[in-house]
């Protein structure tokens, strides 16, 4: 279970200005304290100035609405802002900067209002996830906690659905989708809601990030075209995936150090020997680091098909291309270059080939 950290917002605003001004007064702030605005998505500083008698003014121009943090050198706390080109006034006290108020921005007001509704659910998800991970009696306690987590997750997704439906043109709706992306069960669920956004919202900062997330999720998906790659074989000769076009190809991700891979190899060998003369072959992609170990495993396990590797371990470029995060994994590619199945094992692999190859 991954730790869940995100924030949601719910704005509605028409942007008219072409620049922003963030001015404020933080009582008790030391003179010459550096005040700065960092963009939340990458931490880049977009503006900075020095405070005098607690007063400061920051100005600039933003290309689009985004999440930012107003910070003060020497102070750990920040003021969260979701803003575009607006005039915002900040007021607060140096001993409790996080509680500073921001006025003048409808966008930020709605962001804060939504956080008030969402934060309890976020906290419940995080606390439940921690309890699940630390459960001492998995057979009973873990199942109960998972039900609580799923019920809370569904409430969050219901709110997201309502947000996107009511505010399809808002760039913050895109931010909402991006923030809760880990909670969706599949890329299809995310895509369905992404399509509810207007074209302009889809082209916002977070809309583009969602589009990239969806594009990444489609890489290696069944029904998509396999992305071509080149890597060196055991004799240091370049081998290109597309050179096998016209055949059924099983791209097999494995390594000599991978116990489950080695246990599966006899099944793969059996399938290869059965169909190698029937328009079928295998291309092994190894996540090894040591060439001698790689070659020994190929020989010991009698893997007589083509093998490639760049000996970069988990940083293997083909594995990175296809977002391979665990092995063994494989994908079956049709003669026309489409991925038609993923992660076939044992009898399942043999049965699939039996259906395809007569």
Image (cartoon, helix red, strand yellow):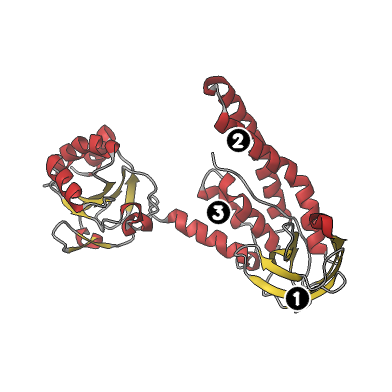
Which one is in front in this view, the residue at disc 2 or the one at disc 3? 2
Q: Left of 64 or right of it: where is 324? A: left
> Is disc 2 placed on a helix, strand or loop?
helix
Query: Is residue 256 in sight in this rendering?
Result: yes
Where, by quadrant of the figure, is residue 329 drawn? top left
Label 1: few (<14), some or many (≥20) within 10 Å?
A: some
For the residue pair 188 and 76, the one nearer the viewer reads as 76
- Residue at (62, 69) in percent of width and height: 44
Query: Is residue 169 in sight in this rendering?
Result: no
- Residue at (26, 59) in percent of width and height: 310
Q: Distance between the residues labelled 2 and 1?
A: 40 Å
Of the image marks 2 and 3, the number of the one nearer the N terminus: 2
Q: Which mark is residue 49?
A: 1
- Residue at (74, 46) in percent of width and height: 118
Rendering coords of residue 348 (x, y %): 28, 35
Q: In this view, does 253 lie above or below 241?
A: above
Disc 1 vs disc 3: Cβ atoms closer than 8 Å? no
Q: Residue 263 carries which label?
A: none
Q: Left of 13 or right of it: where is 282? A: left
Which one is in front in this view, the residue at disc 1 or the one at disc 3? 1
> Is disc 1 placed on a helix, strand or loop?
strand
> Is disc 3 placed on a helix, strand or loop?
helix
Of the image marks 2 and 1, the number of the one nearer the N terminus: 1
Q: Mark 3 points at which residue?
A: 191
User: Which quadrant: the N terminus?
Assistant: top right
Q: Name the residue under label 2.
A: 130
Of the image marks 1 and 3, the number of the one nearer the N terminus: 1
């Amino acid at each position: 279970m991954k730790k869940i950290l995100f924030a949601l917002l719910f704005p509605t605003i028409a942007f008219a200005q072409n620049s922003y001004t963030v001015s404020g007064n933080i009582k008790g702030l030391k003179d010459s304290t550096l005040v700065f605005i960092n963009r939340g998505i990458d931490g880049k500083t977009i503006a900075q100035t020095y405070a005098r008698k607690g007063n400061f003014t920051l100005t600039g121009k933003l290309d689009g609405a985004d999440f930012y943090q107003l910070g003060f050198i020497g102070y750990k706390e920040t003021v969260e802002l979701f803003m575009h080109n607006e005039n915002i006034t900040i007021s607060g006290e140096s001993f409790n900067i996080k509680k500073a108020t921001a006025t003048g921005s409808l966008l930020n007001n709605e962001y804060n209002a939504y956080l008030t509704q969402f934060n309890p659910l976020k906290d419940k998800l995080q606390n439940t996830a921690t309890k699940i991970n630390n459960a001492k009696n998995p057979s009973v306690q873990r199942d109960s906690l998972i039900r609580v987590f799923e019920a809370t997750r569904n409430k969050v997704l219901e709110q997201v659905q309502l947000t996107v439906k009511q505010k399809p043109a808002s760039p913050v709706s895109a931010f909402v989708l991006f923030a809760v992306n880990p909670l969706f069960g599949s890329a299809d669920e995310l895509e369905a809601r992404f399509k509810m956004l207007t074209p302009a919202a889809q082209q916002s900062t977070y809309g583009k990030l969602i589009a990239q997330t969806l594009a990444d999720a489609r890489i290696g998906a069944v029904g998509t075209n396999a992305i071509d790659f080149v890597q060196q074989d055991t004799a240091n000769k370049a081998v290109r995936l597309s050179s096998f076009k016209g055949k059924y190809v099983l791209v097999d991700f494995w390594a000599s150090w991978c116990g489950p891979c080695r246990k599966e190899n006899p099944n793969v060998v059996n399938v290869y020997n059965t169909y190698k003369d029937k328009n079928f072959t295998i291309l092994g992609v190894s996540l090894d680091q040591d060439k001698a170990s790689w070659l020994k495993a190929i020989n010991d396990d009698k893997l007589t098909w083509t093998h490639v590797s760049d000996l970069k371990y988990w940083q293997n470029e083909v594995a990175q291309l296809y977002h391979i995060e665990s092995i063994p994994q494989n994908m079956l590619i049709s003669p026309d270059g489409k991925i038609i199945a993923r992660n076939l094992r044992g009898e399942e692999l043999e049965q699939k080939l039996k259906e395809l190859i007569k």
